[in-house]
Amino acid sequence: MTPFLFLLLVTLCYTGFTALCLSMEKHQMDLHGAARAGSRRMRAWRGLGWTLLAATLLIAARADGWARGPVAWLGALTAAGLLLSLCVLPYRPRWLAAVAWALGGLTLLSALLPRLA
């Protein structure tokens, strides 16, 4: 597995976990207070989160096969979960989207870097 692909898996897992966080009322209250999203939007966040996590498993399995792909997927889940639960959510909950954009930019940069050299 290439570093770019693993970073892509971590980014997708982080985005999926962020969507699952936004589907919970507690985190909605932390982020938006009384202006939280409605139940329909929270269900959409939940569906998006689970879809992203499932898609990440399929990407990992397609890249490394079903023998090693799920192991890489679990590693990406662990890295994204640690980043979200230990670094961003307890201290800076409003940074959820900014970290997702930064991870996306880092993934794009890691994809373009070998082509530029």
Image (cartoon, rainbow, N blue to C red):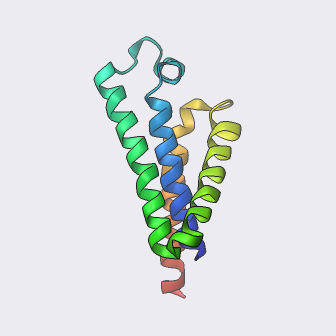
Q: Is 103 left or right of 41, judged from the image as shown?
A: right
Most extreme residue toward the right is 86
Q: Nearer the viewer, residue 92 or 27?
A: 27
Q: Nearer the viewer, residue 66 or 3?
A: 66
Tell me which residue sits at (54%, 20%) in the image: 30
Q: Nearer the viewer, residue 110 or 23?
A: 23
Tell me which residue sits at (36%, 42%) in the image: 48
Can you say whether 66 is above or below 16 in the image? below
Q: Which x, y percent locates residue 51?
A: 38, 47
Q: Is 61 left or right of 41, judged from the image as shown?
A: right
Most extreme residue toward the top is 34
Q: Which x, y percent locates residue 92?
A: 63, 32
Tell me which residue sits at (42%, 42%) in the image: 49
Q: Which x, y percent locates residue 40?
A: 28, 24
Q: Quadrant of the N terminus?
A: bottom right
Tell me which residue sits at (43%, 52%) in the image: 54
Most extreme residue toward the front is 67
Can you say whether 55 is above or below 51 in the image? below
Most extreme residue toward the bottom is 117
Q: Quadrant of residue 76?
A: bottom right
Q: Which x, y percent locates residue 82?
A: 68, 45
Question: Total label count?
Answer: 0
Q: Quadrant of the C terminus?
A: bottom right
